[in-house]
Amino acid sequence: MRTHSRRALFGAGIAVAGSGLLSGCATGTTGSGLHSGMDGMNGMNAMKGMNGTAPSPDTGGHTPSGYVSPDGPEVAEAERRRGAGPVRRFSLKATECRLDLGGRTVHTWTFGDELPGKQMRVTAGERIALTLHNRLPQSTTLHWHGLTVRNDMDGVPGVTQRSIRPGASFDYLFAVTTPGTHWVHPHSGLQLDRGLYAPLIVDDPREPLSYDDEWIVLLDDWVDGVDGSTPESVLKELHGGVDRGPMAHGSTEMAHDDAKGGGGSHPRHGGSRPADGPSRILKGARSRLLGHDAGDVDHPYHLVNGRTSRDPRTFRAKPGDRIRIRFINAGSETAYRVALGDHRMTVTHTDGFPVEHAETDALLIGMAERYDVIVTAGDGVFPLTVLAEGKGRSALGLLRTGSGEAPGPSARPRNLYGRILTADRFRAAESVRSVSRRPDRTLEMTLTGTMEKYDWAINGSPYTPDQRYPVEAGERVRIIFRNHTRMWHPMHLHGHTFELSNGGARKDTTILLPGRRVEVDFHADNPGLWMVHCHNIYHSESGMMTIIGYRKK
């Protein structure tokens, strides 16, 4: 048996090579190779500065006095310490397209006219050089979720880089040191609730797991292009019919782009339905696992690897195969309960980091969380059932190892209701567990807001780009999250991984239930300006995000 397999499959049993270059799409019309058309500025001057000292473009924002700049010498030095391994080159094109979700065709935005976007695969110690071509009617960026990238490559408009204008391109270049299951998505407005996402797998050169096949499973909730709905019209409805618009992370550039917004009013305020589609407000979504209210957006479809349950993708293997399943929740507002019919799952990783192995019947996966599991395939056809937790809808994938009729969309395997694990139940594997240490600094972040006002915030202050929670390089930092709302929130920290308390799992995203307190610790070893935000995109774009800033020494 191989130590690990690079046969990464989305569904149809077609192997995807991972050892060479994978191109997300054809090169854009502005040219090929490393270049920058971003706002007419030079990016990284082609391949100059591959030792980590390449000049970075203006952020388009403002770094207050006394804080490390995203393109400062401290950032370059941290990148130099990560090393200068071989370069893997990629090209990605963000574009409008018509997309078949499996019996339903929608007009939306994707990477390379595919959903999900093509897999990118590298080995820890290598560097990624990727050109993003923006062919959208709106400015965009690319965020590398889960990677400890250099700060000016993090993809937050108005904070770490200028937005990439329509028709322009931008070059991302950085060292990759974090093995595991990761993904990429925009960090501009509500673009995540379209089709702009792709898996990013970073192989561990010392991978200890043994398995035969690999199945990458991306979960998503879908509204864009269905009966006239757009993410912008959904947000406007959530705001009571007032077009407050997305925060866009402080960038004013998106205000001049075609955001394709909608109209209407919030039903809970007695208003009418939005003018460009039916109401997408969800009432009565309840989940014990999520502390009561499961969510407020009624996405009409839920997808497994870009397909609805009416036309699911099939993963093919042989009976007895050990399969590594990499789950990624790319949804914008939905937690998923997942189970593979007649199979127990052995959980090996969460958010890319190993945990002490634990068997379970099902998993609860919040937005942006990732889980790796190992299953031993039975003989037959088995449903991978994905419940939109508390929302009354579902998605489906199929595992086929033999003959038999495929289960239908209504398949509900018994293990969906058996042992269900959540991130707080895991312990970090010894190989990634830090020595317990008293924090040098504690940051308190209380989550505030109500569904009625849709005024989500941190410590009562909605996001502005000049917010800073100061830290200093070398510190052990503790964030105390307190949830004073009636909603659950998946909280994400950019540029770092944190540890849950008492030897818990290492992660970058953690679920915070209503009325609960969660403490996470991280080592301040990646200088710059870093976002902390709720990964419910409608919450973050209404104000539930802020910035941790490294102080200059």
Image: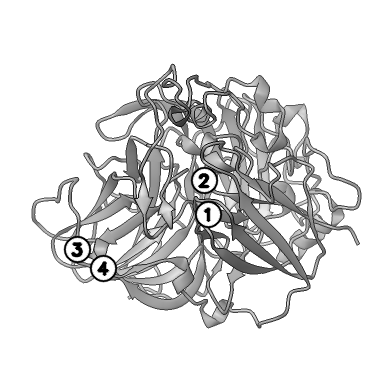
Q: Which residue is mark 4?
A: 418
Amino acid type, callout 2: Asn
Q: Quadrant of the C terminus?
A: bottom right
Amino acid type, callout 3: Arg
Mark 2 or mark 1: name the one nearer the start of the chain: 1
Mark 1 or mark 3: name the one nearer the start of the chain: 3
Q: Which residue is mark 1?
A: 490
Question: Label 4 near label 3: C-beta < 8 Å?
Answer: yes
**At x 39% / y 27%, what residue is drawn?**
279
Residue 271 appears in the picture as rendered: yes
**At x 14% / y 65%, what residue is drawn?**
379
Q: Which residue is mark 2?
A: 536
Closest to the observer, 212 or 101: 101
Residue 8 appears in the picture as rendered: no
Closest to the observer, 286 or 429: 286
The image shows residue 70, relative to residue 270, as above or below, that is below
Amino acid type, callout 1: Pro
Specify the label residue 414 is tagged with.
3
Gap between marks 2 and 3 measured at Cα: 29 Å
